[in-house]
Amino acid sequence: MKILIEPVNSDTLAFLDTALNQLSTGMGDTHRAGAATLQTALFGEYPVCHAMIARHADGATPLGAALFSPVFSTVRGCAGVYVSDLWVSPEMRGQALGKQLLAKVIKYAEDLWQAGYIRLAAYNDNAPALAFYEKLGFETVTGETGLALSGAPLRKLMGM
């Protein structure tokens, strides 16, 4: 059976929401980005991300998904793509679908904003994901610590 990997559009947004919900559940995370949030993020007045969905050509079940955004590095001297979420359904794991999704992502980002690299993060305790990325040639970024600011500290920074 043929598998389609294509950019998410309004007709396939529900597939993306389902896939990301399954990713969150599988990681033990809370899924906070529902369909309405994804709609705004992907198709609002100022889109902030892009997404790919993998599915059977005649099916209504997502097989894989990737959510990604542009990023720019002055150190690398070029734009790149940050993959915030990559999910492959359990039945499709080990069949190169994750690799195919990442290949589509970088080609899409290269066409849109001349992306020259992929950046992503994986949980330290997710050995299968880390092994997958290492097999593809991803390298651990040494000398950096991931940081985030949200909630009250973010509001304080904003002067609220």
Image (tube, grey):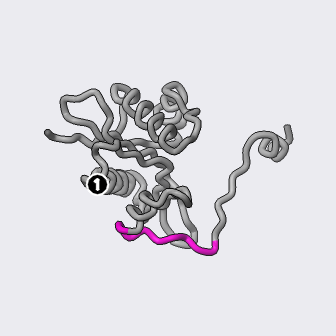
Q: Residue 65 versus residue 95: which sits nearer the camera? A: 95
- Residue 117 image point, x, y percent: 43, 64
Magenta span includes 61: no
Residue located at (63% from left, 74% from top):
143
Residue located at (55% from left, 70% from top):
141
Q: Which residue is mark 1?
A: 94
- Residue 130 image point, x, y percent: 45, 62
Q: Quadrant of the C terminus?
A: top right
Image height of 58 relative to 117, above or below: above
Is residue 54 visible from the viewing direction of this image?
yes
- Residue 90 image point, x, y percent: 34, 44
Residue 11's quadrant in the figure?
top left
Marker count (numbered): 1
Q: Amino acid at mark 1?
A: Gly
- Residue 49 image point, x, y percent: 49, 43
Read off the magenta span. Answer: 135-143
Q: Main secondary structure of the magenta part?
A: loop
